[in-house]
Amino acid sequence: MTRVVARWALAALLVAAGASHLTWGRRGYRVVVPDWAPRLLGTDEDTIVVGSGVVELMLGGALVAFPRERRRIGWAVAAFFVAVFPGNVHQWRTGRPAPLLRTDRARFVRLLLQPALVAWALWSTGGGRGG
């Protein structure tokens, strides 16, 4: 039962994060996008922020809507958390404030939370060992 609660909590976190990327935090999250990402993807920071928000909404919804696919979705969520990690590193290295991350300490703690998010995604979906 605890994995179910953890999975629903993860879904809620992803939906809330996705919604913030599309609304109140949209402009502020642009500073998190590494300078090389728009060149690599052939787009701009805003499109990357919006795209990541849409992906978060989709992953959060999928965790709830497709329980039979939870392991695969868990791996997709974990991969997403790995994929956005360079943005977290970029923000920490540049010291730029973003929504909810206004201090160097907050930005550093956010880096340390990333592996926990990956583990949470895998554990709560049975995607990791013991699932």
Image: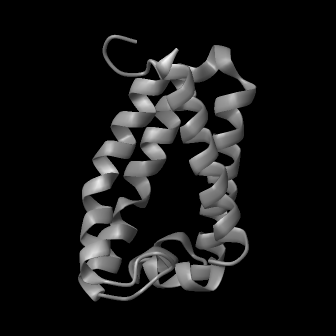
The answer to whether one can see residue 44 in this image is: no
Indicate the position of residue 103 as horizontal and vertical percent values. Answer: 31, 83
- Nearest to the observer: residue 6 or residue 130: 6
Q: Residue at x 28, y 77 (%)?
A: 92
Indicate the position of residue 10 as horizontal and vertical percent values. Answer: 54, 40
Q: In which quarter of the image is the C terminus?
A: top left
**Vertical placement of 60 versus 39: above or below?**
above
Residue 51, quarter of the rendered image: bottom right
Q: Residue at x 27, y 64 (%)?
A: 109
**Vertical placement of 12 versus 75: above or below?**
below
Please tell me how many numbered marks the rendered image carries.
0
Indicate the position of residue 116 as horizontal and vertical percent values. Answer: 31, 44
As drawn, is 75 to the left or to the right of 107? right
As drawn, is 115 to the left or to the right of 44? left
- Nearest to the observer: residue 83 or residue 127: 127
Indicate the position of residue 5 as horizontal and vertical percent values. Answer: 55, 27
**Vertical placement of 66 versus 109: above or below?**
above
The answer to whether one can see residue 124 in this image is: yes
As drawn, is 126 to the left or to the right of 50? left
Q: What colour scheme does the image use? A: one colour
Q: Residue at x 37, y 41 (%)?
A: 118
